[in-house]
């Protein structure tokens, strides 16, 4: 009888210890996700702003969420899928009322935002303001968790960036009055400079792991194809000026990240080649399960590229046939493919680490 009591006691002690270890492992393995950028990453911040740059109406969000959430797609965006791969819940928009649970991360991205303050000023949350929101978040975490736990959380977190397209579309289509005399190279240098300043500031606050998407082949989006056609510009059908700027940006970004890796202690990063991935799907949609890579699912006018024309009456019959949902933004199916490449893709698409490997780094 004594042996049985001892065995039962031992069993419960072992079980309790196992639960403690499992709980500890789960807590230890969690990586928060802090998201910055423009419409490709915005999960609803612009819903809470006085701005015309919104996706808070159907058919946006209809496929997955069954209602419009502010995401510029028919369903989930890349950060939503990355959160799922990382065993996190959907990361909420920073401006969402009543949102005070920050330990899984926050999304600061805003549709239309650029790295430059002058881009869509007054209509969006620029990168500088997104950074100020993150600073406030750190203060909140310090109060809630204490400085030691906050330091650990921020050092293990992933900081995702997808920004720059709006800067270059603005520059190429109507040259901002604030920056009228910039050459291409000067403008790219300014955009990259603002981005690297933000990275260094986050690093100074404890951030160590950064995930980037370079710029996709935005010049070949339905919106810019339509704009190009309206201006009667000869060429590839794409707006080549934006494509050239995107390629210059991507080269400068890769160089800047290598420089930061040498300069900043503990800085590790993943850089996804969205330009190559998007171009492949635009040029050869059937290879990736699409029927259409140049025309949007939802919109009006040439290529269905009119960004204000997406409504329930203009949406396509089968969204999964399309790479683009509206004139600029991918469908949920395309977002999943891009997210999968970012998470576990090979070195020809994401380097020096994919996000799955990056998050395992100490």
Image (cartoon, rainbow, N blue to C red):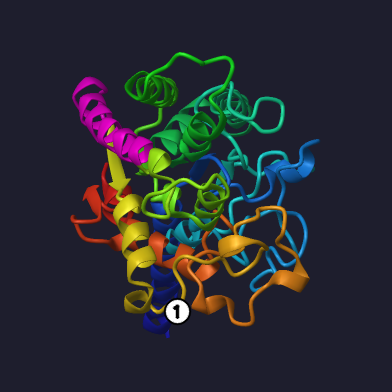
Q: Residue at 46% across / 52% down in the picture?
A: 27
Task: Work out whether residue 56 can be spotted.
Answer: yes
Circle 1 Cα neighbour tier, 10 Å, few/some/many (<14 / 14–19 / ≥20): some
Among the 4 quarters of the image, the one containing residue 343: bottom left
Q: Quadrant of the N terminus?
A: bottom left
- Segment tinted magenta in the rendering: 244-266
Q: Say which of 165 and 34 sits in front.
A: 165
Q: Residue at 40% across / 75% down in the picture?
A: 11
The answer to whether 74 is drawn above or below residue 29 in the figure is: below
**Magenta part mainly helix, strand or loop?**
helix
Question: Residue 141 in the image: x percent, y percent?
Answer: 59, 32
Among the 4 quarters of the image, the one containing residue 192: top left
Disc 1, SS: loop
Q: Which residue is mark 1?
A: 291
Question: Residue 97 in the image: x percent, y percent?
Answer: 79, 42
Q: Residue at 57% across / 14% down in the picture?
A: 178
Assess whether residue 203 is covered by the magenta stretch: no
The answer to whether 42 is drawn above or below residue 191 in the figure is: below
Task: Work out whether residue 96 can be spotted.
Answer: no
Question: Residue 335 in the image: x percent, y percent?
Answer: 47, 63
Q: Quadrant of the C terminus?
A: top left
Question: Residue 115 in the image: x percent, y percent?
Answer: 49, 28
* Residue 230 placement, left or right of 276: right
């Amino acid at each position: 009888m004594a042996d049985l009591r001892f065995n039962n006691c031992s069993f419960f002690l072992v079980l309790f210890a196992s639960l403690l270890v499992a709980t500890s492992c789960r807590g230890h393995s969690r990586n928060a996700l802090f998201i910055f950028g423009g419409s490709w990453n915005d999960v609803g911040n612009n819903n809470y702003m006085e701005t015309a740059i919104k996706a808070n109406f159907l058919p946006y969000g209809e496929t997955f969420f069954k209602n419009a959430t502010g995401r510029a797609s028919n369903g989930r965006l890349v950060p939503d899928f990355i959160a799922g791969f990382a065993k996190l819940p959907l990361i909420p928009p920073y401006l969402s009322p009543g949102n005070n649970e920050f330990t899984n991360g926050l999304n600061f991205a805003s549709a239309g935002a650029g790295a430059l303050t002058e881009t869509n000023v007054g209509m969006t949350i620029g990168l500088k303001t997104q950074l100020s929101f993150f600073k406030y978040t750190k203060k909140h975490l310090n109060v809630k968790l204490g400085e030691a736990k906050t330091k650990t959380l921020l050092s293990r977190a992933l900081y995702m960036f997808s920004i720059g397209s709006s800067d270059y579309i603005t520059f190429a289509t109507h040259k901002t009055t604030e920056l009228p005399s910039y050459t291409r190279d000067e403008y790219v240098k300014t955009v990259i400079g603002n981005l690297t300043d933000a990275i260094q500031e986050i690093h100074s606050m404890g951030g160590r792991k950064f995930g980037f998407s370079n710029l996709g082949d935005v010049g070949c989006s339905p919106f810019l194809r339509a704009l190009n056609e309206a201006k009667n510009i000869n060429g590839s059908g794409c707006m080549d000026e934006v494509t050239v700027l995107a390629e210059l940006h991507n080269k400068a970004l890769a160089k800047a990240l290598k420089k930061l890796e040498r300069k900043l202690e503990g800085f590790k990063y993943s850089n996804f080649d969205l330009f190559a991935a998007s171009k492949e799907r635009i040029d050869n949609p059937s290879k990736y399960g699409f029927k259409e890579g140049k025309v949007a699912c939802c919109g009006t006018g040439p290529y269905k590229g009119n960004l204000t024309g997406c409504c329930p009456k203009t949406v396509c019959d089968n969204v999964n046939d399309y790479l683009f949902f509206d004139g600029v933004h991918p469908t949920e199916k395309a977002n999943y493919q891009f997210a999968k490449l970012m998470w576990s893709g090979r070195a020809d698409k994401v380097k020096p680490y994919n996000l799955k490997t990056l998050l395992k780094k100490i």
